[in-house]
């Protein structure tokens, strides 16, 4: 962890806010801004959070869906327990053939929304990192198609540039409407952008 990165994090208002409010990560604010823009998350929904660790998005969603809602937090890493009773965790690789079946069992059927903030380990080589992100995004989309209800929605992280158009094209095949949005909480120099798929066909 470089000194420069530490200094930037200390100056980051979203990092400070997350720490002050006991949020797992600053990423929570990205989802809050996406939700505010598109009015996605409502009471009683059943939502799957792919790449959930450390749990910032899961925290936000669990509060929004309420006691009768459900969040299935999926990650290859173990997620530290959250106090919310409406959160169930699943430690599994999303490429595992058993993953969709296990998610459907936990959720007791198809879900209203799939969120994916999945990101690869960055190499620092732009072309390699974009290719890895595209691969992850396509895997997340494949998962969504197997577990989403008709008319459901998806929020999916992509990197701007090169092959990212493939992800957007695949989203358009599965959703009636696709919007792209870069939340203010995303770092300015970050290539990340979020694709929002509405009305799953």
Image (tube, rainbow, N blue to C red):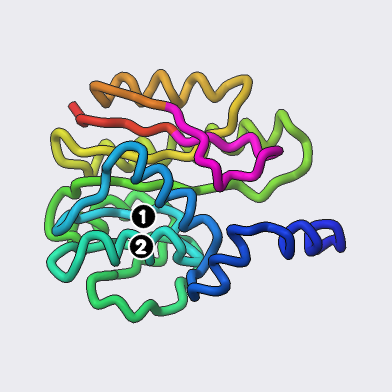
Circle 1 residue: 49
Residue 116, label in figure: none
Residue 73, label in figure: 2
Earlier in the chain: of badge 1 and badge 2, it is: 1
Q: Is 77 above or below relative to 178?
A: below
- Cβ atoms at labels 1 and 2 below 8 Å apart: yes
Q: Examine the residues drawn in magenta and state their main secondary structure.
A: loop
Q: Secondary structure at mark 2?
A: strand
- Rendered location of residue 141, percent (x, y): 37, 36
Numbered range of the magenta stretch: 180-194
**From mark 1 to mark 2, how far is it between C-alphas?**
5 Å
Q: What residue is drawn where x is 47% and y is 36%?
A: 194
Q: Is 161 above or below relative to 112?
A: above
Q: Is residue 95 visible?
A: no
Q: In front: 105, or 173? A: 173
- Rendered location of residue 24, percent (x, y): 50, 69
Q: Quadrant of the N terminus?
A: bottom right
**Residue 189 belongs to the span the image colors magenta:** yes
């Amino acid at each position: 962890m470089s000194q420069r990165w530490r200094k930037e994090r200390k100056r980051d208002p979203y990092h400070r806010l997350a720490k002050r409010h006991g949020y797992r990560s600053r990423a929570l604010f990205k989802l809050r801004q996406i939700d505010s823009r598109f009015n996605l998350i409502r009471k009683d929904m059943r939502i799957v959070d792919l790449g959930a660790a450390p749990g910032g998005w899961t925290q936000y969603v669990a509060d929004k869906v309420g006691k009768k809602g459900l969040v299935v937090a999926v990650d290859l890493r173990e997620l530290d327990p959250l106090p919310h009773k409406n959160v169930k965790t699943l430690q599994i690789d999303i490429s595992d053939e058993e993953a969709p079946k296990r998610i459907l069992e936990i959720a007791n059927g198809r879900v209203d929304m799939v969120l994916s903030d999945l990101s690869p380990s960055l190499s620092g080589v732009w072309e390699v990192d974009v290719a890895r992100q595209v691969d992850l995004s396509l895997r997340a989309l494949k998962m969504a198609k197997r577990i989403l209800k008709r008319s459901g929605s998806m929020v999916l992280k992509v990197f701007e540039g090169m092959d990212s158009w493939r992800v957007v094209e695949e989203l358009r095949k599965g959703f009636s409407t696709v919007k792209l949005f870069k939340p203010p909480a995303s770092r300015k120099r970050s290539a990340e952008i979020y694709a929002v798929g509405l009305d799953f066909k």
